[in-house]
Image: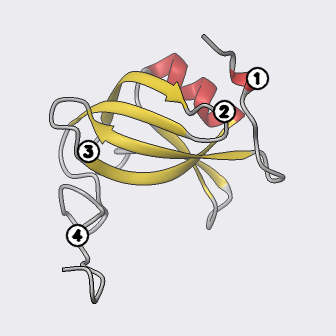
Amino acid sequence: MRSIEELKWDARGLIPAVVQDAASGEVLTVAYVSRESLKKTQEIKETVFYSRSRQCLWHKGETSGNTQKVLSVTADCDLDALVIRVEPKGPACHTGARSCFFEPVEGFE
């Protein structure tokens, strides 16, 4: 078991996090977390990310109600990426889609 401080944060103090539906295994989104957002996630047991565009913490579902209850957080072998397994309450994507991953890339259909 690793502490938050042992994780390998990038130069901006962030780590990418793959958010996965714990029941289905579906990847819902990829977002970034900071030490502060990960500690807040630990505290409230819901996903809190760091918005790179707004440069502030972002509690997923705070305004939409589409929260994500955190069941587990695991780091990869290099300690520089996370998988956050969640129980989603509503869609993950701001478009209203269940997952943010729905755009096929040409040549890979």
- Which sits earlier in the primary sequence, circle 1 or circle 2? 1
Which numbered tag is attached to residue 102? 4
Q: Nearer the viewer, residue 31 or 95?
A: 31
Which numbered tag is attached to residue 79? 2
Judging by the rendered image, the residue that carries numbered circle 3 is: 66
Amino acid type, label 1: Glu
Q: Is residue 95 left or right of residue 50?
A: left
Q: Nearer the viewer, residue 89 or 106?
A: 106
Judging by the rendered image, the residue that carries numbered circle 1 is: 6
CA gap between label 3 and label 1 equals 30 Å
The answer to whether the residues at label 1 and label 2 have Cβ atoms under 8 Å apart is yes
- Which sits earlier in the primary sequence, circle 4 or circle 3? 3
| Residue in the picture at 26% in, 43% down | 65
* Element at label 2: loop
Quadrant housing residue 6: top right
Amino acid type, label 4: Phe
CA gap between label 4 and label 3 equals 18 Å
